[in-house]
Image (cartoon, helix red, strand yellow):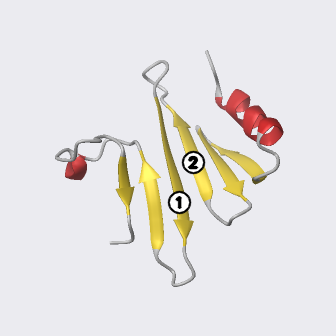
Amino acid sequence: MVDIDDIKRIADTEFADIVINTTIIDYKLRIALKNHSFIDVYLSRSLPDKFGYHWECMDESGTIYRYDNVPDKNWQVISTYPYHFHNGT
């Protein structure tokens, strides 16, 4: 079974060309990227092999964009559920 340390090692070694740093916060891994965005990876503590993630960036105007796979009941009507994109609105 993969753990958060395994994912951290992969991000740090295999993606060193785009990763600035990685930080483990409780059960979440935050991966800071060179383009000033970040990815959070969450491993489920109750369901084996289940995970959540989101990628977030901010443009020059301060608008935040985010893509994630966390089931959000507000997005159940879209065909890609639970995957969804927040476009700053």
Residue holding disc 1: 56
Which x, y percent locates residue 82?
31, 40
User: Which amino acid, by three-letter code, is at mark 2?
Assistant: Asp
- Classify 37 as above or below 28: below
Instruction: Check the picture and name the quadrant holding the C terminus.
Output: bottom left
Q: Quadrant of the N terminus?
A: top right
Tell me which residue sits at (45%, 59%) in the image.
66
**Identity of the residue drawn at 69% across and 64% down:** 35
Circle 2 sits on which residue? 40
Q: Is mark 2 on a helix, strand or loop?
A: strand
Marks 2 and 1, how far apart in space? 8 Å
Q: Where is residue 58 in the image (x, y as percent from the top left)?
A: 54, 71
Residue 25 screen position, x and y as percent:
64, 46
From the viewer's side, name the closer residue of 17 and 7: 17
Mark 2 touching mark 1, by CB under 8 A? Answer: yes
Position above or below: 53 against 65: above
Q: What residue do we see at 28% from left, 41% from top?
A: 81
SS label for mark 1: strand
Please state which of residues 26 and 66 is positioned toward the viewer in this rendering: 66
Tell which tag, 2 or 1, sits nearer the viewer. 1
Q: Residue at x 68, y 32 (%)?
A: 7
